[in-house]
Amino acid sequence: MVDEERRFSKALIGKTVVSKSGKKFGEVGDIIFETKSGELIHIVMKNVTPYTEKLELEKDKEGRLLVPFSAVIAMGDFLVISEEDVI
């Protein structure tokens, strides 16, 4: 079971992140999670769009933009996020 969850998390890396209105945010670069519970906390963004750069999103120590995982509303070919939960 744990291996399936790990594969699932790795499958998210590189997926395009879009809002439910269709605005492209960038791609999933990494995922931050709570090690004890396994709860997914943030999506670390890469290849962010100019639109995303203008938003005042939280950043990690390296300056990478973070999107709260709680904003994810659908996962498939894309990660769809609720823009209202991000900004």
Image (cartoon, grey):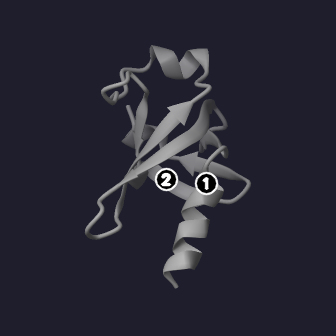
Q: Position of residue 84 (x, y in %)?
A: 41, 39
Type of amino acid under label 2: Val
The residue drawn where x is 62% and y is 26% is 47
Q: Residues within 10 Å of mark 1 (few under 14, many from 20)?
A: many
Type of amino acid under label 1: Leu
Whether 6 is drawn above or below 45: the answer is: below
Q: Which residue in the rendered view is the most extreme toward the right?
A: 77
Q: Residue tagged by mark 1?
A: 12
Specify the quadrant of the image occupied by residue 56.
Answer: top left
Q: CA distance from mark 1 to mark 2?
A: 12 Å
Specify the quadrant of the image occupied by residue 46.
Answer: top right
Element assignment for label 1: helix
Element assignment for label 2: strand
Q: Position of residue 26 (x, y in %)?
A: 61, 31
Q: Position of residue 78 (x, y in %)?
A: 68, 49
Disc 1 or disc 2, which is closer to the eye? 1
The residue drawn where x is 38% and y is 21% is 63
Is residue 6 left or right of 14 when viewed as pictured? left
Q: Residue tagged by mark 2?
A: 72
Is residue 58 left or right of 69 when viewed as pictured? left
Q: Position of residue 79 (x, y in %)?
A: 61, 50
Specify the quadrant of the image occupied by residue 70.
Answer: bottom left
Whether 24 is drawn above or below 32: the answer is: above
The residue drawn where x is 55% and y is 61% is 9
The residue drawn where x is 52% and y is 56% is 73
Which of marks 2 and 1 precedes in the sequence? 1
Mark 2 and mark 1 in contact (Cβ < 8 Å)?
A: no
Q: Which residue in the rendered view is the most extreme toward the left?
A: 36
The disc placed on residue 41 is none
- In the depicted view, which residue is nearer to us: 76 or 40? 40
**Looking at the figure, which quarter contains the C terminus?**
top left
